[in-house]
């Protein structure tokens, strides 16, 4: 007996439709009136379309009805498309605050005294009155890395000790604290991970935590240490998974593409080196499996710093929350009904380019994280090769970059705060030299947003009736300034941009999935206040 598609119960048809991509649902809708009515009238299908369109995923732990989730999501997307905040709130920073982290709706600030990390759950409602909390240490803080979803903050400290010959060295440790209580983290077997002894009291350190991996990277000024050092620990057990040396001054930051793929910029080789993290240390140091060459610079120029960033990190979606039953940690977690899809984020790379006598240039390029993973999958068969015994696949920029990246000259922008992207969005703010204020610009790299724009307005151009606030860029452009490169460099990743009607006088910007944060500095140094622009 043959079962006709239309003879299936509506509930089953809806479940089938919700497995389809957005383009197929739209095509389905055009086939006949019966399917069209189901698609238009079903809250489940409409919510699925809205999630797909916004590169979001449902929070299965949220108890809100789907109809309310759909309404909230639509309101949120409209607010972001117009950059119309639902409310604003100014939060004064603690005294002596300066460096920061922004994760999952919680902002973290260090201080000049180097013994305190301040943190605050940002408001999601105009009636919220957030209060600063803090975790203090006895030893001097070098760096910290919070992961709100794991109720974890890793704080790296240095403690001086005198050796037998009278020389002072510094013991570098990572303390693993439960964020909600400040106590040792209950899932960490070792509260303090001993990393190494160093002649430098304040090494340049960058720490990332994804899944079970905790990766600190050390770069040392001066001649005390001859090499940069890269570690990967299992933070729950304290076990060292891998350690290796890199050329002095070559590696200062990293980016997790997945739990076991680590991208480390190489400033000496002008490349982005991608490593597969082994399960345990081997006899040979790891080598990259894929190397993405950056554009060649003209004579006299060099890449001084390369800062990569993607948010949210892998393994931080609701499926990986580890303290759902704990009231103390739950107060820090967002109660949102949906979250950005981790596999559909952009990665932002800030490049600081020095010249032997000209002014420093800052460039930024944006790339879909999935595009980087696709390059790894395409060029590296991990089941057939030993990464420690095989030469890496080296890809020139002309092969991987032009269609996959979008470049910006950032020297005149105030985004020294690197927390300038979340999901598919990236924010920019020009320096406010005249004091009259400048607009905030939000760029949406969601391919579906670009498709929707082009369907409404044609390819390129401005939205009718709103020529200065919203526009789409989809052309393959030559990267400026031209003179810093040895040859023309192109980038063509499309995006839709929106500029605010309001002009702002912030000194820096940050953003997460719900809000834009404008930072104002003190004349004497440090952070004065943070203004929350809540969009939803």
Image (cartoon, grey):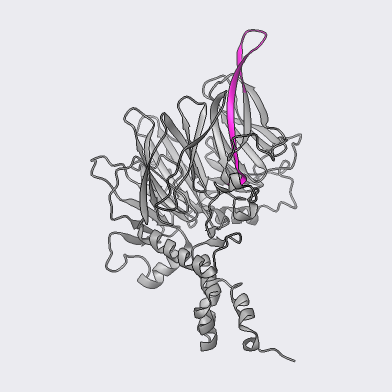
Residue 165 falls within the magenta-colored stretch: yes
Give coordinates of residue 95: x percent, y percent. Answer: 41, 30
Q: Which of the image's four quarters has the N terminus? A: bottom right
Residue at point 49%, 67% (across, down): 68
Q: Quadrant of residue 74?
A: bottom left
Percent across and percent down for residue 204 are: 53, 29
Q: Is residue 444 left or right of residue 39?
A: left
Magenta range: 149-171
Q: How many marks?
A: 0
Nearer to the camera, 516 or 355: 516
264 relative to 140, above or below: below
Q: Is residue 441 above or below residue 1?
A: above
Residue at the spot 58% in from the left edge and 36% down from the top edge: 207
- Which SS does the magenta portion mostly show? strand
Q: Residue at x 57, y 28 (%)?
A: 248
Q: Position of residue 127 (x, y in %)?
A: 40, 51
Farthest-out residue, bottom: 1
Quadrant including the C terminus: bottom left
Residue 283 percent across, percent down from the top left:
76, 34
Is residue 473 inside the magenta stretch?
Answer: no
Q: Can residue 250 be seen at all in this image of the molecule? A: no
The residue furthest top is 165
């Amino acid at each position: 007996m043959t079962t006709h598609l239309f003879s299936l119960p509506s509930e089953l048809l809806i479940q089938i439709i919700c497995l389809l991509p957005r383009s197929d649902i739209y095509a389905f809708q055009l086939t006949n009136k019966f399917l069209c009515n189901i698609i238009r009238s079903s809250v489940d299908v409409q919510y699925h379309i809205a999630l797909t369109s916004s590169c979001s995923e449902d929070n299965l732990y949220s108890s809100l009805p789907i109809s309310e989730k759909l309404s909230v999501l639509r309101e949120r997307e409209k607010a972001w498309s117009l950059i119309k905040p639902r409310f604003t709130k100014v939060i004064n920073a603690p005294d002596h605050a300066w460096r920061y982290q922004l994760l999952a709706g919680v902002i973290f600030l260090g201080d000049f005294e180097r013994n305190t990390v301040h943190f605050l759950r940002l408001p999601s409602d105009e009636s919220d009155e957030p209060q600063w909390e803090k975790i203090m240490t006895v030893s001097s803080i070098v760096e910290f890395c919070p992961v709100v979803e794991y109720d974890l903050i890793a704080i790296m400290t240095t403690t001086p000790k005198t050796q037998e010959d009278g020389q002072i060295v510094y013991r570098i440790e990572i303390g693993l604290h439960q964020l909600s209580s400040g106590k040792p983290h209950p899932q960490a077997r070792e509260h303090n991970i001993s990393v190494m002894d160093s002649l430098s009291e304040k090494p340049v350190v960058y720490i990332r935590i994804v899944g079970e991996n905790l990766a600190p990277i050390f770069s040392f000024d001066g001649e005390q240490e001859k090499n940069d050092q890269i570690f990967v620990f299992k933070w729950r057990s304290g076990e060292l998974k891998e350690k290796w040396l890199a050329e002095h001054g070559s590696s200062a930051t990293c980016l997790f593409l997945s739990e076991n793929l680590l991208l480390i910029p190489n400033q000496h080789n002008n490349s982005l080196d991608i490593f597969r993290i082994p399960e345990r240390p081997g006899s040979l140091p790891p080598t990259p499996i894929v190397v993405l060459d950056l554009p060649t610079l003209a004579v006299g120029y060099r890449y001084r710093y390369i800062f990569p960033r993607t948010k949210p990190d892998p393994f931080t979606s609701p499926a990986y929350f580890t303290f759902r039953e704990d009231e103390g940690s739950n107060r820090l977690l967002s109660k949102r009904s949906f979250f950005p899809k981790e596999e559909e984020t952009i990665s932002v790379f800030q490049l600081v380019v020095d010249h032997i006598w000209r002014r420093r240039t800052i460039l930024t390029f944006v790339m879909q994280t999935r595009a980087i993973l696709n390059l790894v999958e395409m060029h590296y068969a991990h089941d057939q090769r030993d990464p420690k015994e095989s030469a890496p696949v080296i890809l020139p920029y002309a092969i991987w970059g032009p269609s996959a990246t979008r470049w910006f000259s950032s020297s005149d922008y105030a985004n020294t705060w690197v927390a300038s992207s979340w999901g598919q969005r990236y924010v920019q703010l020009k320096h406010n030299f005249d004091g009259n204020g400048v607009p905030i610009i939000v760029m949406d790299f969601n391919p579906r947003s670009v498709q929707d724009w082009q369907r409404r307005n044609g390819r390129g151009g401005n939205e009718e009736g709103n020529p200065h606030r919203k526009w789409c860029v989809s052309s393959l452009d030559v990267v400026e300034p031209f003179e810093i490169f040895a040859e023309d460099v192109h980038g063509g990743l499309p995006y839709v941009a929106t500029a605010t009607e309001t002009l702002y006088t912030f000194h820096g910007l940050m953003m997460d999935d719900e809000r834009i944060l404008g930072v104002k500095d003190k004349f004497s140094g440090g952070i004065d206040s943070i203004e929350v622009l809540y969009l939803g």
